[in-house]
Amino acid sequence: MPKPTASNRIAIIGPSSSGKSTLAGNLSHMLEAPVLHLDQLAHIPHSNWKRQPSDFIVLEQRKFMLDNERWIIEGNYSVCMPERFDHADTVIWCDPSLAGCIYRYIKRCIEGDKNRAGALDGAKGEFSIELIKFTLNTYPKNKLKYANLIAQAPHLKLLHLKTFKDIKQFKL
């Protein structure tokens, strides 16, 4: 498994339920770097996942990057991905099987894991067929977009983790 050197600004991307938030929390603890969970930024707390305006997401991410010399930003959100990649030095792409992601999502809904890293304050952990559709239909289309954005930022170190085992065991 590849290991980065001197990563100070890390972007973590990948499909829903791939382990991005947990990995971000673990790296934040190890590196003593603040973490921004984009799901928490992009949705209104206690709204059950009502989306914030795109300009709010872009501006708040920018503020986080400017306020912190070192940072970890976890999540996708194409509206703010180019700027994030411009300022990041490392991208960790969590890219396990989508079937595994769906399994983990259903398990999370059944077990009711409200204290997980990246959870939205006050959101219900209800099952959403829309999230499954998004994961199965939209994420595969977005993979090409993400790869192109990464290719446009040759300064980035890319760590492409393709299994849940690699994601769980990853350490800098």
Image: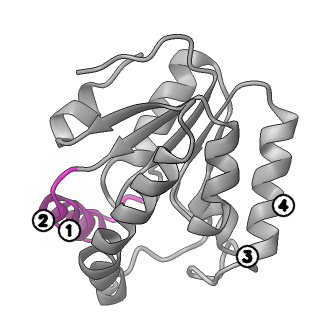
The verdict on residue 100 being magenta is yes
65 sits left or right of 85 in the view: right
**Which of 121 and 67 lies nearest the eye of the viewer?**
67
117 sits left or right of 67 in the view: left
State which region is magenta: 96-113
Amino acid, disc 1: Ile
What is the distance, in whole Å, between disc 1 and disc 2 at their CAs? Answer: 5 Å
Mark 3–mark 2 contact, CB under 8 Å?
no
Amino acid, disc 2: Ala
What is the distance, in whole Å, between disc 2 and disc 4 at their CAs? Answer: 34 Å
Mark 1 or mark 3, which is nearer the start of the sequence? 3
- Residue 156, image x, y percentages: 53, 32
Mark 4 or mark 1, which is nearer the start of the sequence? 4
Amino acid, disc 4: Leu
Q: Which residue is mark 2?
A: 99
Q: Which residue is mark 4?
A: 59
Q: What residue is at 20 percent from the left and 42 percent from the top?
A: 162
Viewer-nearest of labels 3 and 2?
3
Amino acid, disc 3: Ser
- Residue 171, image x, y percentages: 36, 19
Mark 4 or mark 2, which is nearer the start of the sequence? 4
What is the distance, in whole Å, between disc 3 and disc 1 at their CAs? Answer: 26 Å
Q: Which residue is mark 3?
A: 54
Q: What residue is at 48 percent from the left and 46 percent from the top?
A: 150
Q: Which residue is mark 1?
A: 102
